[in-house]
Image (tube, coloured by chain):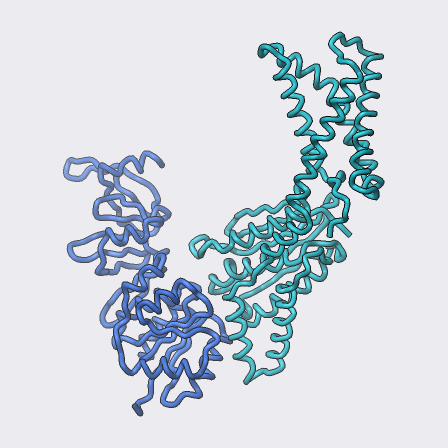
Chain colours: A blue, B cyan
Amino acid sequence: MSQTLKILIADDETPARNRMRDLLGDIEHVTVVAEAKNGKEAIDLAQTTMPDVMLLDIRMPVMDGIEAAQHAQKLEPKPYIIFTTAFDAYAIKAFDLNAIDYLLKPIRLERLQIAINKAHALKPLPLDALKPLQKMRSHLSIHERGRVLLVSIETIIYLRAELKYITVRTAEREYLVEESLTSLETEFGERFIRLHRNCLVAPQFIAGYEKRTIDEESLWVAMFKEIPETVAISRRQQYLVKQT
Amino acid sequence: MRKNSRLPNLHNLGIHLRILLIVNLLAVMAAILLSKQLGEFFTLLAQISALVQPIILLSMLGLYALYPVLNKLKYWQGALVIVLLEITFTYLVFIFIYHYFAFDTIPEIGRACLLSAIVTGIVLYYFYLQERAYSPAIAEARLQALQARIRPHFLFNSINAVLSLIRSQPKRAETALEDMADLFRVLMSENRDLVPLAQEIGLCHQYLDLEKLRLEERLKITWQIDDMPSDAMIPPLIMQPLLENAVYHGIEPMPEGGEIIVKIYTKLKELNIVINNPYAPQNDRHNGNKMALKNIEERLKLHFDLESSLKTSTKNSRYEVHIRIPEKI
């Protein structure tokens, strides 16, 4: 293989990135196209640099490597993922079981070489194996006009199930994701409450409640701090209004 | 290291608290045995207390004062002196009460002295057993088991950081490896004796220098230790694991890093060590944190018994550990 492999390095520690760059400098036919300080930066940079290989540290602030790898599956072309870690017994066990590539820090040149060589034979990342390692995603990744947008969970005001999609509402705008409301509720249950059969709401954005009459039927709606829209509260959930 | 004497430390508040508890418990038992109904029980307990409390008070003061002398004797001599002392105290209290208050239920003086000797024997035996449970050999073994362990995460990341320096900054790599050697020498040391506070602070500096290598400007430390007594004695590796926690849970999960504040001061003859770090609950990882805290708490207990305390609190997204130990110089 004479074609040059484009590599993205993601690690929150500068010395670790330097070391990786040094080692990659000793390997032929590779070039480092981007360096990221966390998973979110890695996904953002990957969109413009289109790396063939992403070297992801597992423990990073903002977004860890496990989550970044999952979002990276939406990138086009799909990069080959190699995890790096100093010590994470739980993750290493899962990687071994599912033949996921990883490198232990301090990284040896030979090991790195072998892992990079394997990258030529692209194989899909077993996403199911990563699921148990992921506690709660920090971001939702949204495919939009050929780009992958990352929306921080903390900025989401509500999630509403439409026909086939979920509408994700932040203070700025709306996004559409292809996920199920039930699985989102299981994953982010700590953060959202279900105000209606089709709607999960982050309570800290709620400004107040109001009784409205729509179609001669009176019902409670929740109003929000930064957006004009309201969310109807189903009868079953009205006790939540009374609690406040 | 403890001396050969097995007498309890009579300058320790916790010991006196236990004496108070045991003797009063025995008094309650006596009242239960002697009384036929509930009303009688309270009368009896009041009468017994009226005799017992002055004796306890007198003995606690006496023992506190005499402890330095008693500690120089052999164990059996010390114990004998204490029994005799208690009989004397009982005798004195009885004479006093006999003279000034006309109790009609007052027991015979000889019997009271015998009871007092028995109660003293029970208390001494309790402390003997307790001392054996915490005997130097066993305490040593437990301290060894409890010896602070450094996170593998830190070790491997640090080695990786040092490796990154070797090509570009060999001088810095040298210093870092030297710091690492010092740190591990202490961590692997067999020595569990108290060390001067200044020594522990030095170790903390070396540890933090290594973390700075990895985390750079993300790691900020403020030392408020101008008033600290540098020669105060503390158990080794009390602060370093706490700083390691602060870095792992407080600094590493923050993209911009944060500030760790270390405060050390003396107040009311107690050494206060406060370590405060930023904390975001959503970033919280596995509860390895609790392990280190429990470990330190147990080591403090082995060294200071009830006289030390370790408290944690979370306020305004900052986490704080506050340790109090008696100031020993």
**Residue B54 screen position, x and y as percent:** 77, 23
**Residue B101 screen position, x and y as percent:** 80, 11
| Camera-side residue of B218 and B128 | B128
**Residue B150 screen position, x and y as percent:** 56, 63
| Camera-side residue of B293 and A218 | B293
Q: Is residue B290 visible?
A: yes
The image quarter containing residue A114 is bottom left
Q: Is residue B156 left or right of residue B180?
A: left
Up-down relation of residue A199 to residue A52 (above or below): above
Up-down relation of residue B167 to residue B105 (above or below): below
Residue shown at the point (21%, 52%) measured from the top left? A161
The image quarter containing residue B39 is top right
**Residue B244 screen position, x and y as percent:** 56, 61
Q: Is residue A152 visible?
A: no
Residue shown at the point (62%, 79%) measured from the top left? B174
Q: Is residue A160 left or right of residue B75?
A: left
Up-down relation of residue B43 to residue B279 (above or below): above
Q: Is residue A19 left or right of residue A153?
A: right
